[in-house]
Image (spheres, rainbow, N blue to C red):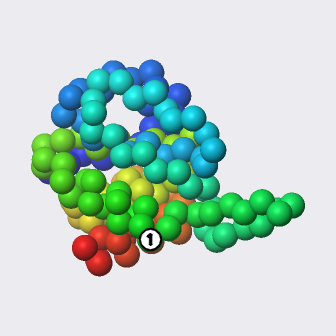
């Protein structure tokens, strides 16, 4: 059974992961990749912490899309059952916890996902997109 952990970018960049760990690295679009050390099992995705497409001063901001959600589910689906899965975003509050809560619910069970909701403020749109992707898989 996988274990799911939520981290901020700063925490993820300071951590030395084991070679068996799986890391989902979520950054803002146009940001540099986070420096992840110790594992080659890294999925990098980039989307904003929003729940719908926004336009401000001619610039568009995109939330997680179906393809990214499916990539995340597929990535974890290929992780051995004893692997630890770490999910980080910039602050480690919303996007990463939305992903981790949905993955925990899908791969472990409802209670595991609810535990993450008790400790963080998951982005519910991200959470729902991951659940949808898991159901489609």
Residue appearing at x 38%, y 53% in the figure: 100
Give whichever of 120, 55 is nearer the camera.
Answer: 55
How crowded pointer 1 is (Cα within 10 Å; few <14, some 14-19, many 20+) is rated as: few
Q: In the image as oriented, which residue stretches furthest toward the bottom?
A: 136
Residue appearing at x 27%, y 60% in the figure: 74
Q: Residue 44 placed where, x, y %? A: 42, 45
Residue 25 in sight here: yes
Query: Which residue corresponds to mark 1?
Result: 66
Q: Is residue 12 above or below residue 123?
A: above
Residue 123 position by quadrant? bottom right
Give whichever of 104, 68 is nearer the camera.
Answer: 68
Q: Is residue 131 above or below residue 20?
A: below
Tell me: 90 left or right of 66: right
Q: Label 1: state its secondary structure.
A: helix
Q: Quadrant of the C terminus?
A: bottom left
Residue 112 in sight here: no
Q: Residue 35 placed where, x, y %? A: 46, 27
Label count reads 1
Residue 91 position by quadrant? top right
Residue appearing at x 21%, y 58% in the figure: 77
Tell me: 19 left or right of 48: left
Residue appearing at x 21%, y 29% in the figure: 19
Q: Is residue 70 above or below residue 85?
A: below
Q: Residue 75 placed where, x, y %? A: 27, 54
Q: Residue 3 placed where, x, y %? A: 24, 45
């Amino acid at each position: 059974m996988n274990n799911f952990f939520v981290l901020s970018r700063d925490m993820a960049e300071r951590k030395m992961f084991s070679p068996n760990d799986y890391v989902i690295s979520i950054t803002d679009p146009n940001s540099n990749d986070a420096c992840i050390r110790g594992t080659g099992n890294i999925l990098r995705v980039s989307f904003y912490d929003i729940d719908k497409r926004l336009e401000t001063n001619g610039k568009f901001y995109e939330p997680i899309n179906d393809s990214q959600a499916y990539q995340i589910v597929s990535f974890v689906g290929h992780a051995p059952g004893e692997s630890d899965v770490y999910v980080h975003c910039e602050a480690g509050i919303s996007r990463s916890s939305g992903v981790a809560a949905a993955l925990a619910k899908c791969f472990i069970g409802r209670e595991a996902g609810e535990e993450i909701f008790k400790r963080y403020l998951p982005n519910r749109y991200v959470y729902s997109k991951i659940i949808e992707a898991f159901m489609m898989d």
